[in-house]
Image: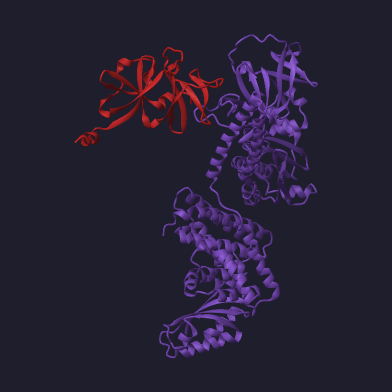
Amino acid sequence: MDTNQYLEVFIDESTEHLQSCNENLLALEQNPHDLSIVNEIFRNAHTLKGMSATMGFEDLADLTHKMENVLDGIRNEKIEVSPEILDVVFESIDHLEAMIGDISEGGDGKRNVSETVEKLKRIENGELIDGSNAKAVVEDSSEDRLVSVTALTYDDFERTIIEQSNEQGFGTYEIAITLRDDCLLKAARVFMVFEVLEKCGDVIKSVPAVEQLEAEQFDTDFSIAFVTKEAIETVEEAIKKVSEVKEVVVKKMFFDLVEENVLEPVVASSTAKSIDVEVISQEATKVVTNSTAKQSEKPVKSSHATSKTIRVNIERLDILMNLFEELVIDRGRLQSIAAELNHNELNESVERMSRVSSDLQNIILNMRMVPVETVFNRFPKMVRQLSRDLNKKIKLDIIGAETELDRTVIDEIGDPLVHLIRNSLDHGIESPEVRVAAGKPEEGRVELRAYHSGNHVFIEIEDDGAGINKERVLSKALEKGVVTSELASKLTDTQINELILASGFSTAEVLSDISGRGVGLDVVKSTIESLGGTITIESEEGKGSLFSVQLPLTLSIISVMLIEIEQEIYAIPLTSIIETSIIRKADIMNAHNQKVIDFRGKVVPLVFLEEIFEVPRTDDPGDDFHSVVIVRKGDKMAGLVVGSFIGQQEIVLKSLGNYLTNVFAISGATILGNGQVALIIDCNSLIK
Amino acid sequence: MTENVAMDVEVMKVIVFQLGDKEYALPVEQVQGIEKMMHITRVPRTAHYVKGVINLRGVVTPIIDLRDRFGVTTTVSSENTRIIIISEEDMEVGFIVDAANDVMDIQKETIEPQPEVVGSLEEEFISGVANIGNRLLILLNLEKVLSTLK
């Protein structure tokens, strides 16, 4: 079977299933006794197993299978949920993720997981737990299940019965019975076995069918699907008492297991679910009303999630975006032509076109929006792992995961956030003892928030930890030479806080693996700034800290102010501009060889773009005034001296290509209405 | 019969362009297009031979003046001045040349390693020389031409 065309779908869906496993496992850790969560995980794992087996990724299917066995034990309450067991399950999921990653990069998904498999097996066999009564039943299940699953197939009706029996607290089992080779009265033995079974439960199905069994049309073994409320051990014992029975193998069975028989794994879960609904309506024998209601909720939910969306390759969206960018450029061109010609009808239609295209722009930008969830969803697991490593108790709350951001920003923001969260866990939240001594709850809390505000998205990480010790930060900064002592005395609280973002800075007394090599936070800062964002820190000692990251909604179309220097046109992003102003040459002052102006009571250094950009001069500017654009970078300001202002415009950000990299003070280029290229000034590198 | 000959001799298609009084050649696969001179936006603080960037149908493309790159005396751009757009690995760059006027087939066996006598500034940028009739075509080593900026 040519599976290539399904590979993409497979990878997408597997990733989703694994993510869902992750989330549910975390939920399970909070509510270890909520079996519905286990069922959900089981379902995900099961679908994944089926899919990977169909796609031919045996290792993947195999590991999933082993993991499933453990989940099965948990679901049957044979294995008690404990952090140690979840660790192993998480570990397997990590492996699975790595395999999927490998597959998506064209690999074969093979990976050495023997250690994890070993651990899973041990858990499955009850070695890590003390529930010894479970042992007998669980022990043989791993090898035999596959066999049994292929041995027994169920139709929709039987499947429903099995599932509903489960729901109502009946145990459903597959019993494989082997008669002695020298058994003479096979039909009689079968009859006796059935008699035993029917005393304590219901036989749903047998393989071979009852008629064949009665006609002795079978070898020495047969299988039975069985529903009972009795303890299965008793049933097993009872069957064993029947003469000439050589072996009885009992396994607990679930609806999901049954599902394995459905051939197309990708659609397996959905078909199965829709079948549920149908059967429920006509099959009332064992259905209690409230469980019906509960059942029917599920399909509704799943259909809601799948309806009216299509998967579009991100490349196509990029192409669409590129085409639209062309359109924006032409729009600018048309606007300038129309303004020149001043023709009424032309003006009108250009205006209309501008309106339509800005609507279009919104839609296209929206299409590229991705919820930050895609970045956030890896954090709960990370926090869990880290807090265990650090021996701290930490709860992570995520708010606003549905907040959307442009994909280009999403791709970049992951690593900085990882750093910030690690920082909060490592340096922010104290150890439980310290917290209790300080009168705080033992469990630390980290809140990760995302929300929209204007043209920006804010992502905030707040912890209720120790906060920033300003004296220590200052003394450390002085020691490391990050600030001078004169400067240090003048710093505001916020400025002191932000010193921890400076390079070569680390306050943790004990360096740990998690953070604190002094190379993390300055990278965070520069990454965020390169995305056109800012980061601020608020902190109160003893109460906690708040790291706030402000990001632009999109990176591809931005608002700029166009300015002219001699013959050249440059663009300054509006986000960095505070205001524009005309100053008199006489107002320029000199301070330490630096020309400055007094701007609303603040001393602002002047940057002469003409000099910085070595603009060829045509004639000497004779007038007494300078046009100045006041820009900011955090709290710092600078006045960029330009030739003249042109105006505000929406432009499409273009890169300078791979040949021209690291051009000083230029962050990119754009194409103007007249078809010429204008360079975009990177204000951040102009302010020191 | 003629086909056989063509099969036996490896042929390379090249674009021939002029720089000063010399003729240079680039494999046709590396040439994306030839453009007339257009407005170039200067990019400040780059190497002297980087003339700036152009808008090549929506793609911002850097432009290198090969005359400056090789240290050939600068001539003023004329009617014939062209921009040859080339691609090398993941880069697209335009070269300003005095004229681009020919596409030729060069038999690979006629390509010789660069003779010692050339011995000028441009030496390091040359990957070979082809002598065809009375014309001497200099084959450029693009990697070298584009490398020094890094």
**Whether residue A140 is situated above or below residue A55 in the rendered picture:** below
How many callouts does the rendering have?
Answer: 0
**Who's red, chain-wise?**
B
User: Can residue A558 be spotted in the picture?
Assistant: yes
Quarter of the C terminus of chain A within the rendering: top right
Q: Is residue A147 left or right of residue A449?
A: left
Query: What residue is drawn where x is 40% and y is 19%?
Result: B99
Outermost left residue: B1
Quarter of the N terminus of chain A within the rendering: bottom left
Query: What residue is drawn where x is 64% and y is 59%?
Result: A304
Q: In this view, does B65 lie to the left or right of A411?
A: left
What percent of the width, then of the height, locates residue A221? 45, 81
Query: Who is closer to the viewer here, A672 or A346?
Result: A346
**Whether residue A326 is situated above or below residue A302 in the rendered picture:** above
Q: Is residue A652 left or right of residue B89?
A: right
What percent of the width, then of the height, locates residue A564? 64, 20
Q: Quadrant of residue A93?
A: bottom right
**Who's purple, chain-wise?**
A
What percent of the width, then of the height, locates residue B135? 29, 19
Query: Who is closer to the viewer here, A45 or B139?
Result: B139
Q: In which quarter of the image is residue A367?
A: top right
**Whether residue A5 is situated above or below residue A174 in the rendered picture:** above
Q: In this view, does B46 lie to the left or right of A34?
A: left
What percent of the width, then of the height, locates residue A219? 41, 82
Q: Which colour scheme is used?
A: by chain
